[in-house]
Amino acid sequence: MSIDVDAPFRVPTDRYTEPDWATREARRLWPHVWQLACSLDHVAEPGDFFEHRIGWLSVLVVRGDDGVLRAFQNVCRHRGNPICQGSGSGLTELRCGFHRWCWDLRGELHEVPSRRGFGAMRNEEMPLFAASVDTWGPLVFVHLDPEASSLAEYLEGVHEDIVWAGLEDFRCSTFVEVPVNANWKTAVDGFSETYHLQGLHREMLAVVDDVDTPQRLWSRHGKSMQRYGVPSPRLGAGVTDQEVWDSFTLVMGTRIGIPTDADPGPAPAVPEGSTLMSVIAEKVRAFQATQGVDLTRFDDEQIMNIQQYNLFPNMTLLVYADLVQVLRARPGATPDDALLDGFFFDRHPTGDPAPRVKPLDVRLAPEDADFGLVLNQDFALLQRAQRGLHQPGLTHLTLSADECRVINFHRNLERVVGADER
């Protein structure tokens, strides 16, 4: 699928700023789409639970005592109180803290205090409201509709496109939530194109080709691929290996064991017939070997190229052979607020018998969040961009065909929520 435009594609700014549009999303979008809830590591053992919030909606993901993963609307059927908050372990029941109504981990009602006052009421008539739940690699998805079409169908061909990476070998180490003063779509747009690298991330240009970046569109989702270890054509000829090396270690030196604030030293020697990209790829293999991970089955391109998937409506999946990151944007209390989430995954040896460990869950203020140079720049820009969207002269955004993943996102949003005036 491709995007053909005869003129710039226009997106009304109202959909980023107006409460009426946010209300339409709350009613027409979020209850009707598959969406990432948490990592498999959050709910790996019986009694583990995780509350996924999206706007006013709350979905409870829980691992039953029978080992089955289930999801429920997080609401007591007595007076509407949420049953669980946050995430945790060791649940043996789902008990409301308001009046102590209680369900088992399968969502079946089994206790109502002072039951006589309710008259004739059968337990089997009052289960928790079920939601759909499914997994893809280390990711857990939910859908408010218990009869929703399958997650595999929703993912279209994305899960087949990425099978080479072996997502099942990744485990989540950290989940970070950061509130920001920007609309959730401002974040989604920013993570759906590489056009901004030349402006916002100029430190990267010596180490990434941001021009020849193949993109692919499915019906709902999109993908781009960027080559690392080579300079951007925007810089012209004459970029030295030292400049490429300095840029790589600044942006992602931790992939080869070099802290971002350390002096990387001189660029490594490149054997005759090889390239600096291949030399760096071998350093990634060597570093992963010290972590007990064998990357020899991956070629240099798979190690050095980033595969970036934008899954409708609000998830960006970044995949290398050695690491996976997920960025997610959720609506906040107003159209000018959002929550930005980061899930960070490390590759483990295939078939690692070690038990899964719960990720470190952290909520940070924007000024305290440090995700490295590139993401820090993205986060800072979001809040400036949101301010610009309120200027009275700016009624529409103007997009080019190179921003095809942004266009595809908005076309899908219009299909679900309804189009507005352009």
Image (cartoon, grey):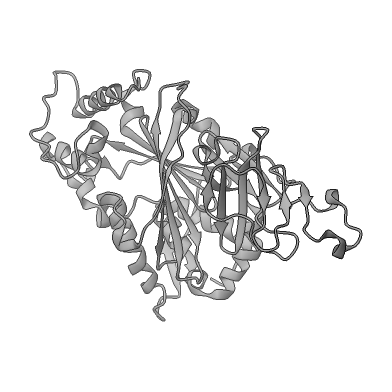
| Residue farthest to the left, as pictured | 266
For the image, the number of numbered tags is 0
Residue 319 image position (x, y, % from top left): 40, 37
Between 197 and 386, the one lying in front of the other is 386
Give me the residue at 35% from left, 67% from top: 383
Asked if one can make out residue 404 in the rendered structure from this viewpoint, the answer is yes
Q: Is residue 360 left or right of residue 99?
A: left
Q: Nearer the viewer, residue 51 or 161?
A: 51
Q: Is residue 8 above or below residue 280?
A: below
Q: Is residue 415 visible?
A: no
Where is residue 321 drawn, in percent x and y? 37, 29
Q: Residue furthest bottom?
A: 392
Question: Observer-nearest residue: 171 or 390?
Answer: 171
132 to 422, vertically: above or below: above
- Across and down, in percent, residue 392 comes to 41, 81
Percent position (x, y) of residue 395? Answer: 45, 75
Left or right of residue 375: residue 59: right
Image point (42%, 58%), residue name: 187
The quadrant the N terminus occupies is top right
Along the viewing direction, whichever of 8 and 26 lies nearer the viewer: 26
